[in-house]
Amino acid sequence: MSDLVIAAPPTVTLPVAGGGRFPVRRIFCVGRNYAAHAREMGHDPDREAPFYFLKPAYAVVTDGADTPYPPATKDLHHEMELVVAIGRGGKDIAEADALSHVWGYCAGLDLTRRDLQNEAKKMGRPWDMGKGFDHSAPMGALVPAAGVNPGKGKIELKVNGEVRQSSDLAMLIWSVPEVIANLSRLVTLEPGDLIMTGTPEGVAAVKPGDLLEGMVEGVGTVRTRIV
Ligand code: MN
């Protein structure tokens, strides 16, 4: 018998390549983690400590489902990213141990209401409504960490078959082990947490009807149509 006063919300899950589902707890996102993207956003990239924002687990769009064009924006941008799935939690994780906390990886999109984010930046306000809206995190299937090198590999996004973003994981300012170690000093990481590791240059607007197809070499793909 449950004493919950409304029905418990469903558990959000990501598909795993080859079968099974991975339950999602939180989604941490790293800002400005590729130098060329930092520059295109008007910032001077450097090795200042990484910074983070979050999306709710309920923002995930999976299994190739369509993504509804969100309300309250005229400038919805794609950001193609490598997503890290934490399988074993911890705090104050050492960089050298960081990858042992990773269950797997997938390709994902950090969809952004750029106009709302820009207004928030200008006003010194939080980014939540620019970043954490409904359906803002389309993701592909997870692959287990064994055999994946998150330090190298092509990352690419095509919109309607045309390459919009193309880079390499080697261009990350903060590597995956560095991000895990740093983030675990700010919060205790838990199994089910996802980390979106930042986007390379080439971000741009999408519109209803556009087909987004992203890939991370050695990891997988993400595919969604904006409707
Ligand atoms: Mn991003």
Image (spheres, rainbow, N blue to C red):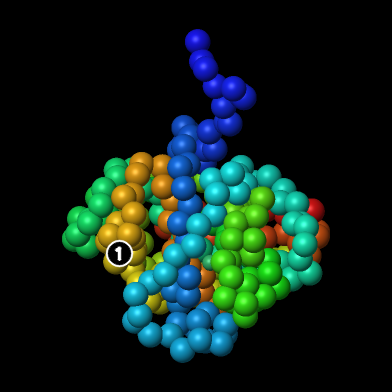
Q: Quadrant of residue 179?
A: bottom left
Asked if the beta carbon under badge 1 is closer than 8 A to the nearest atom of ligand 1, the reply is: no
Instruction: Give whichever of 147, 14 is nearer the camera.
Output: 14
Which quadrant would residue 208 be assigned to in this image? bottom right
Percent position of residue 222, x then y: 58, 54
Residue 92 in view, yes or no: yes
In the image, taking residue 203 as reference, residue 172 lies left or right, namely left
Q: What is the x, y in percent for residue 145?
A: 34, 49
Instruction: Give neighbour class at mark 1: few <14, some 14-19, many 20+ (Cα, 10 Å).
Output: many
Q: Nearer the viewer, residue 156 or 183?
A: 183
Is residue 101 depicted above or below 172 in this figure? above
Outermost residue on the top side: it is 1
Rendered residue at 51%/74% (across/down)? 200
Q: Residue at x 44, y 51 (%)?
A: 194
Q: Which residue is mark 1?
A: 182
Q: Nearer the viewer, residue 54 or 178?
A: 54
